Amino acid sequence: MEPDDFIEDRDDIPNYRDPEEIDAGALSLALGTLRLLGDDPYLRIQAFNLSLVDQFIMRIERQLRQRRFDEEKLPFTEIGFLSAQTQMWIFASYEILRTWRERAKDVVKLARNGGLALKADALDKKLPYFHPGREARASELRRIIEEPSLIDGITLDIRRTHILFSQLEHVRIALAKHEVSGKKKLVAYAPGLASFNRWNGSLEYEISREGAIMGTLNRRDIADSLRALSDGNDPSSDQELESFDKFIKGPPSDLWE
């Protein structure tokens, strides 16, 4: 019997595609639609690696989900291996988005203050050795100088990734630093503790601050959100982003004092 065979049709059940239905390169291609990321060969390698490991983890998640339905208890070693792979994948997802977003914001700032040419000239400065990374970055900036409309697209991409990155940042900081995002003095609640998502088999983490739980985020949701970047959907409005930023900060601290 399959895990969902006993469930009647309901509108509130998450609809996750079977891993076999997801193209192996979909995540990598979706990340490549972000301006500046798709043009950088080194970031594309990171995106490819992320996509490759995502396929590997999805197979483990599906297998354990089926076994959890068939068996009373899963072996600790197998759950532990999934936990280790999941955390490393989340760290990698965070880093590629963080690296790209910082670069994108820097480029937008340089464009606004007229510093693109100066930055490109500095990167083009002759060195006593070949530096492909600097040359690629200088070429990237000169292309933007020639096509200033690219700045609008970069700005939109920054907005499109804002909510996902903020959620991912909260989970990553709790896992890696045992702290609360934006509050170094706050100790994270049970960092690393995860529940097993019954619908997709991935591990799910709380997004919390002190006594408030603002939601949960599971690994598959992160991967699906990254794949959804290829849809080219419009970013959230200023009001929606402002509302989200207020929400993710949690309730006032004096409620817990």
Image (spheres, rainbow, N blue to C red):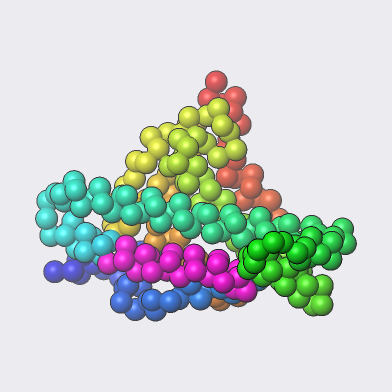
Residue 205 vs residue 233: left or right?
A: left
Looking at the image, which residue sits at the far front?
128
Residue 240 falls in which quadrant of the image? bottom right
- Which residue is located at x 56 percent, y 58 percent? 97
Is residue 252 visible from the viewing direction of this image? yes
Residue 132 vs residue 150: left or right?
A: left
In front here: 50 or 133? Answer: 133
Residue 31 falls in which quadrant of the image? bottom right
Is residue 238 visible from the viewing direction of this image? no
Q: Position of residue 192 (x, y in %)?
A: 37, 41
Magenta segment, prevailing SS (helix, strand or loop): helix
In front here: 117 or 219? Answer: 117
| Span highlighted in magenta in the image | 37-59
Q: Position of residue 165 (x, y in %)?
A: 56, 55
- Which residue is located at x 53 percent, y 70 percent? 44
In front here: 39 or 193? Answer: 39
Q: Position of residue 150 (x, y in %)?
A: 75, 73
- Which residue is located at x 11 percent, y 55 percent? 71
- Which residue is located at x 57 percent, y 71 percent? 41
Q: Quadrant of the C terminus?
A: top right
Looking at the image, which residue sits at the far right?
114
Q: Position of residue 250 (x, y in %)?
A: 57, 38
